[in-house]
C-alpha cells in the first residue's frame, strides 16, 4: 500500500507494519459485528430475550472499535479495507461455524469460543504494536478491555 504520508517519528516501513496489524484487527472487528447479528437473529430457547437484547449493544461496541481502528489506519496515511472480501482476505483466525436456528446456550458457547480467539489475536497485536507504536497499541488495549467484559457477560449466562 502506498502511504499518503507518514506521522512524525514513524518511517514508512514501520507505518506499513502497523497498518497491516491494524487492518487484520479491523477485519475481525467487522466480522464480529456480523457474527453477533447472526446469533441475535437465529437463537432460540431458554434466556432468549435476555441474550437477544444483550447482543445489540455489543454489535455497536465492536463496530465502534472497527471505526476507531479504521480511523487510526487513516491517521497513519493508509486506507482501510472495509469490504466483505477484505474480511475474508485478512482472516488469520478460525471461521465461526454456528449456523441455523440453535439454542441460546449453543450460540453463547460458540460466541465465547470466538471471543477467546478474538481476544488472543488482539493481545498478539498489542505485543507487536508495543514495539512499533504505543498509540496504536493503546487503542487495541482499550478494545480488549471491552471485549473481556462482554466475554464475562456471556460466560455468566452459562454459569
Image: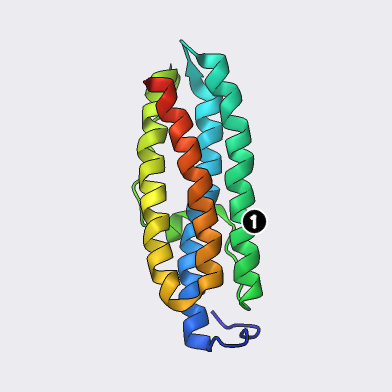
Q: Let me know if residue 31 appears in the view.
A: no
Q: Let me know if residue 83 appears in the view.
A: yes
Q: Nearer the viewer, residue 3 or 63?
A: 63
Query: Where does the image place residue 103, in percent across and percent down from the top left?
Result: 41, 17
Q: Nearer the viewer, residue 126 or 83?
A: 126
Indicate how the structure is coloured in the image: rainbow
Query: Where does the image place residue 77, in percent across and percent down from the top left?
Result: 63, 78
Q: Nearer the viewer, residue 151 or 108?
A: 151
Q: Is residue 6 above or below residue 130?
A: below
Q: Is residue 96 above or below residue 99?
A: below
Picture quadrant of residue 142: bottom right
Q: Is residue 158 above or below residue 112?
A: above
Q: Nearer the viewer, residue 157 or 76?
A: 157
Could you tell me which quadrant the N terminus lies in?
bottom right
Residue at horizontal 56 percent and vertical 70 percent from the top? 135
Please indicate whether residue 92 sits to the left or right of residue 146 in the image.
left
Disc 1 element: helix
Number of labelled discs? 1
Q: Is residue 64 above or below residue 77?
A: above
Query: Where does the image place residue 66, in percent across and percent down from the top left?
Result: 59, 54
Picture quadrant of residue 131: bottom left
Query: Which residue is tagged 1?
Result: 67
Residue at horizontal 41 percent and vertical 63 percent from the top? 125
Residue at horizontal 61 percent and vertical 76 percent from the top? 76
Mark 1 surroundings: few (<14), some (14-19) or many (≥20) residues within 10 A: some
Extreme-top residue of the structure: 46
Could you tell me which quadrant the C terminus lies in?
top left
Query: Where does the image place residue 30, in percent across and percent down from the top left?
Result: 55, 49
Amino acid at each position: 500500500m502506498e502511504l499518503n504520508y507518514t506521522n512524525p517519528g514513524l518511517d514508512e516501513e514501520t507505518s506499513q507494519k502497523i497498518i497491516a496489524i491494524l487492518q487484520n484487527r479491523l477485519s475481525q472487528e467487522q466480522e464480529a459485528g456480523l457474527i453477533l447479528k447472526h446469533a441475535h437473529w437465529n437463537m432460540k430457547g431458554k434466556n432468549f430475550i435476555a441474550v437477544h437484547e444483550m447482543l445489540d449493544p455489543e454489535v455497536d461496541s465492536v463496530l465502534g472499535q472497527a471505526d476507531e481502528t479504521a480511523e487510526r489506519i487513516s491517521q497513519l496515511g493508509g486506507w482501510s479495507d472495509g469490504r466483505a472480501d477484505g474480511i475474508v482476505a485478512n482472516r488469520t483466525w478460525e471461521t465461526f461455524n454456528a449456523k441455523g436456528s440453535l439454542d441460546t446456550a449453543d450460540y453463547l458457547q460458540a460466541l465465547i469460543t470466538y471471543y477467546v480467539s478474538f481476544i488472543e489475536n488482539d493481545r498478539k497485536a498489542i505485543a507487536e504494536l508495543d514495539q512499533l507504536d504505543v498509540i496504536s497499541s493503546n487503542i487495541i488495549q482499550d478494545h480488549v478491555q471491552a471485549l473481556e467484559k462482554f466475554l464475562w457477560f456471556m460466560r455468566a449466562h452459562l454459569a
